[in-house]
Amino acid sequence: MLLTKNSPYENLVGNEPIKEFLLRIVHNKNVGQSYLFAGSEGVGKSLFAKAFASSLLNTENDVTHPDFHLYTPEGKLGIHSIEKMREFSKEVYLAPFKSDKKVFLLLDAERMLPYSANALLKTFEEPSDNTVIILVSSCPEKILPTILSRCQIIRFQPIATSVLEPELFKTHESISKTLLQVAAKISEGSFSKAHHFLEKGQFLRKFLYQKLAHGFASYPDLILFVKDLTAMVEREQCQENETAKNKKNKEEWNNLTAVQKELIEKEAEGIVAVQYHTHLKVLFEIILLWYRDLQAYHACSPSFIINQDMLDLLSLRFQRGNVPSLDKVNRLMKESMLHVQRSTPLNHVLESLFLQLL
């Protein structure tokens, strides 16, 4: 058992076997050159990757360390640009400044366009001896197979509900047990999705379920609902933008060059774009959970209903009949998320979704 009190993984939740593995390879000096941390969103992949980098560089999560290079998606589309990937492939072959190794961490690695990924191929085919590359991805199937084949894949598991709920309670002590259970179910073992729901999704859930229970009186009624729902989601995105802007130190910002300012703006836009997609995933999970609970209600299995505080609304919706199958709902959710990723306006996506769920 290598995990100690001063371990960089001490405060990380879940995936204990991976903690042991990463500690062991560093302790035994058996570290490879390329790793892929794969698993669903919010299970701790990036936190583990930063802790791993910290142990390799013998620092305490110092993101300013000269031998630590962090790459995140940029711009309004939240992608890794070809310019950044070319910069990556050049930096890899430079000698370390301070440590024995350099660590390159690429978050959301699947968010590379093919030509951006191609710019990295040589880096993986002819790696530098003193470099460790860590890719982090929730969708490894979208990464070029030629890159995947050169990485040691470490698969992260969803955080168990028995672990997740107590951790959520530590930061949300005033939340009811029912809401914690809803958050844990919606999250599918993802701490960040559960936290996101508890912070921003509760009002959204009530708003959605009230309307889905009572139904739409007419097509204009549906359009108005979609307009309000879209405004709520986009308001969250605006708040994220404002938060990103407010994080800038005005004095430091004024001392930056135009090129530096542009790079920071792109990075901030990338973070907001990724957060926006997380918010949309939570939205679709809330909708999916409603229809899942309707099926449980139909099967007379109250113990399987997650939204225990919404039983009256579930009963009201069930009495109206014509409950769509979960297969249909699942398919529509996947299609809706795909349309959003392809930049279809959210109001159009939601209108189509609810029309098909009538």
Image (cartoon, rainbow, N blue to C red):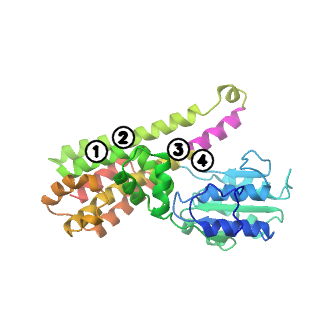
Is residue 262 covered in magenta?
yes
Measured as percent of width and height from the top left, residue 22 is found at 70, 66
Rounded to the nearest angstrom, the CA distance separating label 4 from label 2 is: 24 Å
Q: Do labels 4 and 3 touch, CB within 8 Å? A: no
Which amino acid type is shown beneath numbered disc 2?
Met
Q: Is residue 278 visible?
A: no
Examine the rendered structure and indicate whether residue 153 appears above or below residue 257. Answer: below
The kind of secondary structure element at disc 2 is: helix
Rounded to the nearest angstrom, the CA distance separating label 1 from label 2 is: 10 Å
Residue at label 1?
Answer: 207
User: Residue 232: which disc?
Assistant: 2
The kind of secondary structure element at disc 4 is: loop
Q: In the rendered structure, which segment of residues is drawn in magenta?
A: 257-269
User: Residue 299: which disc?
Assistant: none
Which amino acid type is shown beneath numbered disc 3?
Val
Residue 281 figure quarter: bottom left
Residue at label 3?
Answer: 272
Which amino acid type is shown beneath numbered disc 1?
Phe
Q: Nearer the viewer, mark 1 or mark 2?
A: 1
Rounded to the nearest angstrom, the CA distance separating label 4 from label 3 is: 9 Å
Residue at label 4?
Answer: 74
